[in-house]
Image (cartoon, rainbow, N blue to C red):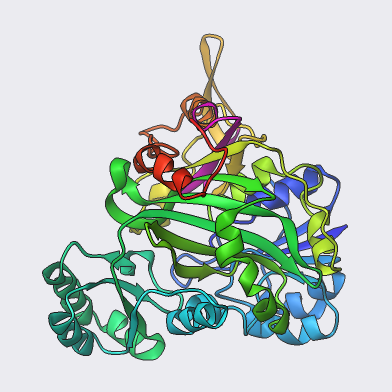
Protein backbone atom coordinates (compact mmCIF):
# COMPACT_ATOMS: atom_id res chain seq x y z
CA UNK A 1 0.00 0.00 0.00
CA UNK A 2 1.15 3.56 -0.74
CA UNK A 3 0.82 5.77 2.32
CA UNK A 4 1.13 9.56 2.51
CA UNK A 5 1.53 11.03 6.00
CA UNK A 6 0.73 14.73 6.47
CA UNK A 7 2.30 15.96 9.66
CA UNK A 8 2.91 18.81 12.06
CA UNK A 9 5.71 18.71 14.66
CA UNK A 10 7.11 15.37 13.43
CA UNK A 11 4.56 13.12 15.13
CA UNK A 12 4.38 10.82 12.12
CA UNK A 13 7.86 9.33 12.14
CA UNK A 14 6.95 6.31 14.26
CA UNK A 15 3.97 5.45 12.05
CA UNK A 16 6.10 5.91 8.93
CA UNK A 17 8.77 3.54 10.24
CA UNK A 18 6.24 0.89 11.26
CA UNK A 19 4.41 1.07 7.93
CA UNK A 20 7.72 0.81 6.11
CA UNK A 21 8.66 -2.25 8.19
CA UNK A 22 5.39 -3.90 7.11
CA UNK A 23 6.29 -3.44 3.45
CA UNK A 24 4.26 -0.33 2.65
CA UNK A 25 5.64 2.49 0.51
CA UNK A 26 5.65 5.62 2.67
CA UNK A 27 6.06 9.32 1.89
CA UNK A 28 6.08 11.84 4.74
CA UNK A 29 5.39 15.57 4.58
CA UNK A 30 6.38 17.40 7.77
CA UNK A 31 5.40 21.07 7.89
CA UNK A 32 8.29 23.59 8.05
CA UNK A 33 8.42 26.39 10.63
CA UNK A 34 8.93 30.05 9.78
CA UNK A 35 11.96 30.25 12.05
CA UNK A 36 13.81 26.97 11.47
CA UNK A 37 12.67 25.92 7.99
CA UNK A 38 12.27 22.25 7.10
CA UNK A 39 12.43 19.90 10.10
CA UNK A 40 15.17 17.31 9.77
CA UNK A 41 13.34 14.62 11.74
CA UNK A 42 13.41 11.36 9.83
CA UNK A 43 16.38 12.19 7.61
CA UNK A 44 18.13 8.95 6.73
CA UNK A 45 15.19 6.91 8.04
CA UNK A 46 12.19 7.56 5.73
CA UNK A 47 11.43 9.32 2.45
CA UNK A 48 10.32 12.92 2.97
CA UNK A 49 8.54 15.45 0.75
CA UNK A 50 9.69 19.06 0.88
CA UNK A 51 7.49 20.61 -1.79
CA UNK A 52 3.99 21.53 -0.63
CA UNK A 53 2.69 22.12 -4.15
CA UNK A 54 3.66 18.57 -5.13
CA UNK A 55 1.15 17.24 -2.59
CA UNK A 56 -1.71 18.49 -4.73
CA UNK A 57 -0.07 17.81 -8.07
CA UNK A 58 1.18 14.30 -7.36
CA UNK A 59 1.21 12.72 -3.93
CA UNK A 60 -2.46 12.95 -2.94
CA UNK A 61 -3.40 11.12 -6.14
CA UNK A 62 -0.55 8.65 -5.63
CA UNK A 63 -1.64 7.53 -2.15
CA UNK A 64 -3.84 4.57 -1.28
CA UNK A 65 -4.14 6.12 2.17
CA UNK A 66 -3.57 9.67 3.43
CA UNK A 67 -3.04 9.93 7.19
CA UNK A 68 -3.50 13.24 9.00
CA UNK A 69 -1.44 13.40 12.19
CA UNK A 70 -3.09 16.60 13.46
CA UNK A 71 -6.17 18.69 12.74
CA UNK A 72 -4.84 22.25 12.74
CA UNK A 73 -3.55 22.25 9.15
CA UNK A 74 -4.30 20.90 5.66
CA UNK A 75 -8.06 20.46 6.18
CA UNK A 76 -9.30 23.12 3.75
CA UNK A 77 -6.73 22.04 1.17
CA UNK A 78 -7.85 18.41 1.48
CA UNK A 79 -11.61 19.03 1.28
CA UNK A 80 -11.98 18.84 -2.53
CA UNK A 81 -9.70 15.79 -2.68
CA UNK A 82 -11.83 13.96 -0.12
CA UNK A 83 -14.92 14.74 -2.22
CA UNK A 84 -13.04 13.40 -5.25
CA UNK A 85 -12.44 10.10 -3.48
CA UNK A 86 -8.93 10.44 -2.05
CA UNK A 87 -8.94 8.18 1.07
CA UNK A 88 -8.08 10.45 4.02
CA UNK A 89 -7.99 9.16 7.59
CA UNK A 90 -8.43 12.10 9.96
CA UNK A 91 -10.40 15.21 10.69
CA UNK A 92 -12.28 17.46 8.26
CA UNK A 93 -13.21 21.14 8.16
CA UNK A 94 -16.54 20.84 9.95
CA UNK A 95 -15.68 18.27 12.60
CA UNK A 96 -12.53 20.06 13.75
CA UNK A 97 -14.72 22.86 15.04
CA UNK A 98 -15.87 20.58 17.85
CA UNK A 99 -12.33 20.73 19.26
CA UNK A 100 -11.03 24.13 18.23
CA UNK A 101 -14.21 26.08 18.97
CA UNK A 102 -14.71 25.34 22.67
CA UNK A 103 -18.18 26.84 22.90
CA UNK A 104 -19.40 24.92 19.84
CA UNK A 105 -17.98 21.71 21.31
CA UNK A 106 -19.88 22.25 24.54
CA UNK A 107 -23.10 22.82 22.60
CA UNK A 108 -22.55 19.61 20.63
CA UNK A 109 -22.17 17.69 23.88
CA UNK A 110 -25.35 19.21 25.24
CA UNK A 111 -27.25 18.47 22.03
CA UNK A 112 -26.11 14.82 22.32
CA UNK A 113 -27.75 14.62 25.74
CA UNK A 114 -24.71 15.14 27.93
CA UNK A 115 -24.66 17.31 31.02
CA UNK A 116 -22.10 20.08 30.57
CA UNK A 117 -20.20 22.36 32.92
CA UNK A 118 -21.48 25.95 33.09
CA UNK A 119 -19.44 27.82 30.47
CA UNK A 120 -19.06 31.43 29.27
CA UNK A 121 -17.38 32.49 26.02
CA UNK A 122 -15.16 35.58 25.65
CA UNK A 123 -13.10 37.42 23.05
CA UNK A 124 -11.64 40.01 25.39
CA UNK A 125 -9.52 39.45 28.51
CA UNK A 126 -10.87 42.59 30.18
CA UNK A 127 -14.43 41.33 29.89
CA UNK A 128 -13.36 37.97 31.30
CA UNK A 129 -11.65 39.60 34.28
CA UNK A 130 -14.81 41.58 35.11
CA UNK A 131 -16.86 38.37 34.86
CA UNK A 132 -14.57 36.38 37.19
CA UNK A 133 -14.71 39.11 39.82
CA UNK A 134 -18.49 38.67 39.93
CA UNK A 135 -18.45 34.87 39.41
CA UNK A 136 -15.48 33.51 41.37
CA UNK A 137 -16.54 29.89 40.84
CA UNK A 138 -15.36 30.14 37.21
CA UNK A 139 -11.73 29.08 37.65
CA UNK A 140 -10.89 27.29 34.37
CA UNK A 141 -9.77 29.07 31.20
CA UNK A 142 -9.40 27.26 27.87
CA UNK A 143 -8.47 28.77 24.51
CA UNK A 144 -10.13 28.07 21.18
CA UNK A 145 -8.12 27.64 17.99
CA UNK A 146 -4.62 26.21 17.71
CA UNK A 147 -3.34 27.88 20.88
CA UNK A 148 -0.46 27.08 23.21
CA UNK A 149 -1.25 24.35 25.74
CA UNK A 150 -0.12 26.61 28.59
CA UNK A 151 -3.22 28.76 27.96
CA UNK A 152 -5.37 25.91 29.30
CA UNK A 153 -5.30 26.97 32.90
CA UNK A 154 -6.95 25.75 36.11
CA UNK A 155 -6.69 28.37 38.87
CA UNK A 156 -6.75 27.68 42.61
CA UNK A 157 -8.90 30.76 43.23
CA UNK A 158 -10.35 33.81 41.46
CA UNK A 159 -7.35 36.03 42.24
CA UNK A 160 -5.05 33.50 40.57
CA UNK A 161 -7.17 33.47 37.40
CA UNK A 162 -7.55 37.28 37.28
CA UNK A 163 -3.76 37.57 37.46
CA UNK A 164 -3.28 35.15 34.54
CA UNK A 165 -5.97 36.79 32.40
CA UNK A 166 -4.37 40.18 33.00
CA UNK A 167 -0.93 38.78 32.19
CA UNK A 168 -2.15 37.32 28.90
CA UNK A 169 -3.91 40.58 28.01
CA UNK A 170 -0.53 42.36 27.93
CA UNK A 171 0.78 40.14 25.12
CA UNK A 172 -0.32 41.45 21.71
CA UNK A 173 -0.23 37.98 20.12
CA UNK A 174 -2.47 36.42 22.77
CA UNK A 175 -4.80 39.41 22.75
CA UNK A 176 -5.19 39.10 18.97
CA UNK A 177 -5.74 35.33 19.21
CA UNK A 178 -8.44 35.84 21.83
CA UNK A 179 -10.18 38.39 19.63
CA UNK A 180 -10.02 36.07 16.62
CA UNK A 181 -10.76 32.64 18.10
CA UNK A 182 -12.15 33.36 21.56
CA UNK A 183 -11.75 31.42 24.78
CA UNK A 184 -14.04 30.01 27.45
CA UNK A 185 -14.27 30.18 31.22
CA UNK A 186 -15.78 27.23 33.08
CA UNK A 187 -16.76 26.41 36.61
CA UNK A 188 -14.15 24.28 38.32
CA UNK A 189 -15.15 20.68 39.02
CA UNK A 190 -13.12 18.55 41.43
CA UNK A 191 -12.83 14.83 40.79
CA UNK A 192 -10.90 12.27 38.77
CA UNK A 193 -9.89 13.18 35.24
CA UNK A 194 -10.55 10.32 32.82
CA UNK A 195 -11.13 10.15 29.08
CA UNK A 196 -12.75 7.71 26.69
CA UNK A 197 -12.55 7.65 22.93
CA UNK A 198 -13.43 5.58 19.91
CA UNK A 199 -12.76 5.15 16.21
CA UNK A 200 -15.57 6.25 13.91
CA UNK A 201 -16.27 5.74 10.22
CA UNK A 202 -19.15 5.15 7.81
CA UNK A 203 -19.93 1.94 9.68
CA UNK A 204 -20.20 3.72 13.02
CA UNK A 205 -17.97 3.19 16.03
CA UNK A 206 -15.39 0.42 16.29
CA UNK A 207 -16.13 -2.25 18.89
CA UNK A 208 -13.10 -1.05 20.90
CA UNK A 209 -12.92 2.06 23.05
CA UNK A 210 -9.79 3.63 24.50
CA UNK A 211 -9.97 4.56 28.19
CA UNK A 212 -7.08 6.84 29.12
CA UNK A 213 -5.64 9.00 31.85
CA UNK A 214 -3.42 11.94 30.87
CA UNK A 215 -0.54 13.43 32.83
CA UNK A 216 -0.36 16.97 31.47
CA UNK A 217 2.06 18.75 33.78
CA UNK A 218 5.82 18.87 33.29
CA UNK A 219 6.81 17.45 36.68
CA UNK A 220 5.91 14.62 39.02
CA UNK A 221 2.82 15.00 41.22
CA UNK A 222 1.27 17.29 38.58
CA UNK A 223 3.59 20.19 39.34
CA UNK A 224 4.94 22.76 36.88
CA UNK A 225 3.47 24.09 33.68
CA UNK A 226 1.06 22.34 31.34
CA UNK A 227 3.01 20.93 28.38
CA UNK A 228 0.16 19.23 26.58
CA UNK A 229 0.99 15.82 27.97
CA UNK A 230 3.99 14.04 29.52
CA UNK A 231 2.59 10.54 29.44
CA UNK A 232 -0.58 8.47 29.43
CA UNK A 233 -2.06 5.35 30.94
CA UNK A 234 -4.42 3.64 28.51
CA UNK A 235 -6.26 0.44 27.70
CA UNK A 236 -8.57 -0.57 24.85
CA UNK A 237 -11.76 -2.36 25.85
CA UNK A 238 -15.07 -3.41 24.32
CA UNK A 239 -17.10 -2.47 27.40
CA UNK A 240 -16.76 1.00 28.92
CA UNK A 241 -19.29 2.83 31.07
CA UNK A 242 -17.67 6.17 30.28
CA UNK A 243 -17.73 5.51 26.53
CA UNK A 244 -21.42 4.64 26.80
CA UNK A 245 -22.06 8.01 28.45
CA UNK A 246 -19.88 10.43 26.47
CA UNK A 247 -18.73 8.73 23.23
CA UNK A 248 -21.55 6.61 21.82
CA UNK A 249 -24.08 9.49 22.06
CA UNK A 250 -21.98 11.34 19.44
CA UNK A 251 -22.69 8.85 16.65
CA UNK A 252 -25.43 10.85 14.95
CA UNK A 253 -23.35 14.07 15.06
CA UNK A 254 -20.29 12.34 13.60
CA UNK A 255 -22.31 10.72 10.81
CA UNK A 256 -23.64 14.15 9.80
CA UNK A 257 -20.07 15.50 9.75
CA UNK A 258 -18.78 12.55 7.65
CA UNK A 259 -16.09 12.03 10.27
CA UNK A 260 -13.49 9.27 9.92
CA UNK A 261 -10.96 8.91 12.70
CA UNK A 262 -10.56 8.88 16.45
CA UNK A 263 -12.67 11.04 18.77
CA UNK A 264 -11.91 11.40 22.47
CA UNK A 265 -13.86 13.10 25.28
CA UNK A 266 -11.99 14.05 28.43
CA UNK A 267 -14.05 14.26 31.64
CA UNK A 268 -14.02 15.07 35.32
CA UNK A 269 -15.82 12.36 37.25
CA UNK A 270 -17.25 13.22 40.67
CA UNK A 271 -20.12 11.89 42.78
CA UNK A 272 -22.60 13.25 40.24
CA UNK A 273 -21.00 11.35 37.37
CA UNK A 274 -18.95 12.53 34.36
CA UNK A 275 -18.62 16.18 33.37
CA UNK A 276 -17.34 16.22 29.77
CA UNK A 277 -14.58 18.81 29.31
CA UNK A 278 -13.48 18.83 25.69
CA UNK A 279 -13.24 16.99 22.41
CA UNK A 280 -10.06 15.69 20.82
CA UNK A 281 -10.87 15.15 17.14
CA UNK A 282 -7.68 13.25 16.29
CA UNK A 283 -5.32 10.67 17.74
CA UNK A 284 -3.93 12.50 20.76
CA UNK A 285 -0.27 12.51 21.67
CA UNK A 286 1.24 10.49 23.28
CA UNK A 287 -1.86 8.27 23.63
CA UNK A 288 -1.48 7.36 19.94
CA UNK A 289 1.66 5.47 20.96
CA UNK A 290 -0.25 3.57 23.66
CA UNK A 291 -2.68 2.53 20.90
CA UNK A 292 0.14 1.47 18.59
CA UNK A 293 1.68 -0.61 21.38
CA UNK A 294 -1.61 -2.39 22.08
CA UNK A 295 -2.86 -2.85 18.50
CA UNK A 296 -2.26 -6.17 16.76
CA UNK A 297 -1.27 -6.58 13.13
CA UNK A 298 -0.56 -4.17 10.29
CA UNK A 299 -0.27 -0.53 11.42
CA UNK A 300 -2.24 0.90 8.47
CA UNK A 301 -4.78 -1.46 6.89
CA UNK A 302 -7.27 -0.92 9.73
CA UNK A 303 -7.47 2.74 8.64
CA UNK A 304 -8.43 1.87 5.06
CA UNK A 305 -10.94 -0.59 6.48
CA UNK A 306 -12.42 2.14 8.71
CA UNK A 307 -12.78 4.41 5.67
CA UNK A 308 -14.74 1.62 3.95
CA UNK A 309 -17.05 1.10 6.92
CA UNK A 310 -15.27 -1.99 8.28
CA UNK A 311 -13.94 -2.63 11.77
CA UNK A 312 -10.77 -4.72 11.75
CA UNK A 313 -8.92 -3.41 14.81
CA UNK A 314 -7.81 -5.93 17.43
CA UNK A 315 -6.15 -4.82 20.66
CA UNK A 316 -4.25 -6.78 23.25
CA UNK A 317 -6.11 -7.12 26.59
CA UNK A 318 -3.39 -5.27 28.48
CA UNK A 319 -2.62 -1.90 30.00
CA UNK A 320 -0.15 0.48 28.37
CA UNK A 321 1.88 3.31 29.89
CA UNK A 322 3.60 5.91 27.68
CA UNK A 323 6.35 8.29 28.80
CA UNK A 324 7.54 11.37 26.87
CA UNK A 325 11.34 11.72 26.87
CA UNK A 326 12.78 15.12 25.97
CA UNK A 327 15.93 17.21 26.37
CA UNK A 328 16.30 20.81 27.58
CA UNK A 329 15.16 23.48 26.90
CA UNK A 330 11.85 21.60 26.34
CA UNK A 331 9.10 22.63 26.94
CA UNK A 332 10.44 26.13 26.30
CA UNK A 333 11.57 27.22 22.79
CA UNK A 334 15.21 26.69 21.90
CA UNK A 335 16.98 29.90 20.94
CA UNK A 336 18.78 28.08 18.16
CA UNK A 337 17.91 24.72 16.64
CA UNK A 338 21.58 23.74 16.92
CA UNK A 339 21.15 23.70 20.70
CA UNK A 340 19.07 20.53 20.41
CA UNK A 341 20.41 19.08 17.14
CA UNK A 342 22.69 16.03 16.64
CA UNK A 343 22.69 14.90 20.27
CA UNK A 344 23.49 11.15 20.30
CA UNK A 345 20.89 8.67 21.54
CA UNK A 346 22.62 5.52 22.76
CA UNK A 347 21.06 2.04 23.04
CA UNK A 348 17.95 3.04 21.10
CA UNK A 349 16.09 0.86 18.62
CA UNK A 350 12.76 1.64 16.95
CA UNK A 351 11.11 -1.42 18.49
CA UNK A 352 7.69 -2.08 20.01
CA UNK A 353 8.63 -0.10 23.12
CA UNK A 354 10.27 2.93 21.47
CA UNK A 355 8.45 5.47 19.30
CA UNK A 356 10.86 7.91 17.67
CA UNK A 357 9.75 11.51 17.16
CA UNK A 358 12.29 14.32 16.58
CA UNK A 359 15.27 12.20 15.55
CA UNK A 360 17.29 11.39 12.43
CA UNK A 361 20.34 9.43 11.32
CA UNK A 362 23.70 10.98 12.10
CA UNK A 363 27.03 10.05 13.67
CA UNK A 364 28.14 9.68 17.27
CA UNK A 365 31.33 8.85 19.14
CA UNK A 366 30.82 5.31 20.38
CA UNK A 367 32.80 3.08 22.72
CA UNK A 368 33.69 -0.16 20.94
CA UNK A 369 35.83 -2.36 23.14
CA UNK A 370 38.46 0.00 24.50
CA UNK A 371 38.33 2.46 21.62
CA UNK A 372 36.17 5.46 20.73
CA UNK A 373 35.04 5.33 17.10
CA UNK A 374 32.56 7.44 15.14
CA UNK A 375 29.64 5.33 13.96
CA UNK A 376 26.29 5.93 12.26
CA UNK A 377 23.77 6.62 15.00
CA UNK A 378 20.28 7.89 15.69
CA UNK A 379 20.60 11.48 16.93
CA UNK A 380 18.19 14.22 17.90
CA UNK A 381 16.73 16.73 15.46
CA UNK A 382 14.97 18.73 18.19
CA UNK A 383 13.99 18.47 21.85
CA UNK A 384 10.91 16.13 21.85
CA UNK A 385 13.01 13.01 21.34
CA UNK A 386 10.90 9.87 21.72
CA UNK A 387 8.03 8.23 23.56
CA UNK A 388 8.54 4.95 25.37
CA UNK A 389 5.68 2.53 26.00
CA UNK A 390 5.30 -0.48 28.25
CA UNK A 391 2.57 -3.09 28.54
CA UNK A 392 1.35 -5.43 31.24
CA UNK A 393 -1.70 -7.12 32.69
CA UNK A 394 -1.49 -4.64 35.55
CA UNK A 395 -0.53 -0.97 35.79
CA UNK A 396 2.52 -1.93 37.87
CA UNK A 397 3.68 -4.34 35.18
CA UNK A 398 3.26 -1.73 32.44
CA UNK A 399 5.14 0.85 34.53
CA UNK A 400 8.06 -1.53 35.13
CA UNK A 401 8.22 -2.27 31.41
CA UNK A 402 8.23 1.34 30.22
CA UNK A 403 10.73 2.63 32.76
CA UNK A 404 13.16 -0.22 32.09
CA UNK A 405 13.20 0.95 28.46
CA UNK A 406 13.70 4.61 29.44
CA UNK A 407 16.60 3.71 31.76
CA UNK A 408 18.29 1.64 29.04
CA UNK A 409 18.45 4.53 26.57
CA UNK A 410 21.13 7.14 27.28
CA UNK A 411 21.26 10.75 26.06
CA UNK A 412 24.27 12.97 26.90
CA UNK A 413 23.61 15.82 29.34
CA UNK A 414 20.48 14.13 30.63
CA UNK A 415 17.09 13.18 29.31
CA UNK A 416 14.06 14.50 31.18
CA UNK A 417 10.80 12.69 31.88
CA UNK A 418 8.24 12.10 34.60
CA UNK A 419 8.69 9.00 36.75
CA UNK A 420 5.09 8.76 38.01
CA UNK A 421 3.09 8.09 34.82
CA UNK A 422 0.40 5.55 35.65
CA UNK A 423 0.82 6.26 39.36
CA UNK A 424 0.41 9.47 41.32
CA UNK A 425 -3.14 10.73 41.74
CA UNK A 426 -4.73 7.78 39.91
CA UNK A 427 -3.59 5.26 42.50
CA UNK A 428 -5.64 7.13 45.10
CA UNK A 429 -8.61 7.78 42.85
CA UNK A 430 -9.02 4.36 41.19
CA UNK A 431 -11.04 2.78 44.05
CA UNK A 432 -13.59 5.63 43.93
CA UNK A 433 -13.81 5.36 40.13
CA UNK A 434 -14.49 1.65 40.32
CA UNK A 435 -17.12 2.05 43.04
CA UNK A 436 -18.97 4.27 40.55
CA UNK A 437 -18.65 1.63 37.81
CA UNK A 438 -15.73 3.10 35.82
CA UNK A 439 -12.40 1.47 34.88
CA UNK A 440 -13.67 -1.96 35.93
CA UNK A 441 -10.91 -4.59 35.88
CA UNK A 442 -8.07 -2.09 35.93
CA UNK A 443 -5.65 -2.87 38.75
CA UNK A 444 -2.21 -2.24 40.17
Nearest the camera: 132 or 116?
Answer: 116
Residue 139: x, y in percent?
A: 24, 70
Membership of 381 in magenta stretch:
yes
Membership of 428 in magenta stretch:
no
Nearest the camera: 20 or 307?
Answer: 307
In the picture, measured across the screen, residue 304 lies left or right of residue 269, that is right
Residue at 41% across / 57% down in the picture?
Answer: 269
Question: As displayed, is residue 411 above or below residue 51?
Answer: above
Residue at 52% across / 77% down in the picture?
Answer: 109
Residue 116: x, y in percent?
A: 42, 75
Residue 30: x, y in percent?
A: 62, 64
Nearest the camera: 252 or 334?
Answer: 252
Residue 31: x, y in percent?
A: 58, 68
Q: In which quarter of the image is residue 170?
A: bottom left
Residue at 66% across / 51% down in the picture?
Answer: 239
Q: Is most of the magenta stretch helix, strand or loop?
A: strand
The answer, for residue 334, to whether it is visible in the render is: no
The magenta stretch is 377-397
The residue at the far top in this view is 370
The answer, for residue 101, to whether it is visible in the render is: yes
Question: As displayed, is residue 184 above or below residue 28?
Answer: below
In the picture, measured across the screen, residue 269 lies left or right of residue 250, that is left
Nearest the camera: 325 or 100?
Answer: 100
Question: As displayed, is residue 52 above or below residue 268?
Answer: below
Quadrant in which the N terminus is drawn: bottom right
In the picture, measured across the screen, residue 329 lies left or right of residue 214, that is left
Residue at 19% across / 88% down in the picture?
Answer: 126
- Count of marks overlaid on the render: 0
Amino acid sequence: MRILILDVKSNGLDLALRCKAHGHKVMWYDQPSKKDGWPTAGYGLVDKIEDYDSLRKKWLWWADLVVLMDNAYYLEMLEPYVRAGVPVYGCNVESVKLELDRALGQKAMQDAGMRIIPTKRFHDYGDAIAFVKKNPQFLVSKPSGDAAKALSYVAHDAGDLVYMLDRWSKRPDLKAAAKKDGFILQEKKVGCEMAAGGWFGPGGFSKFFCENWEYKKLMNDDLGITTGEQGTLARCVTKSKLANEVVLPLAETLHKLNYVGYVDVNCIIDKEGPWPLEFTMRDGCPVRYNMIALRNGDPATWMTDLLEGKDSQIFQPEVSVSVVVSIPPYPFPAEELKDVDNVPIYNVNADDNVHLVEVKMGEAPTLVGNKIVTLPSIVTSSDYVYVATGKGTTITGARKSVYSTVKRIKIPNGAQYRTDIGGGRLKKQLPDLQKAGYAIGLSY
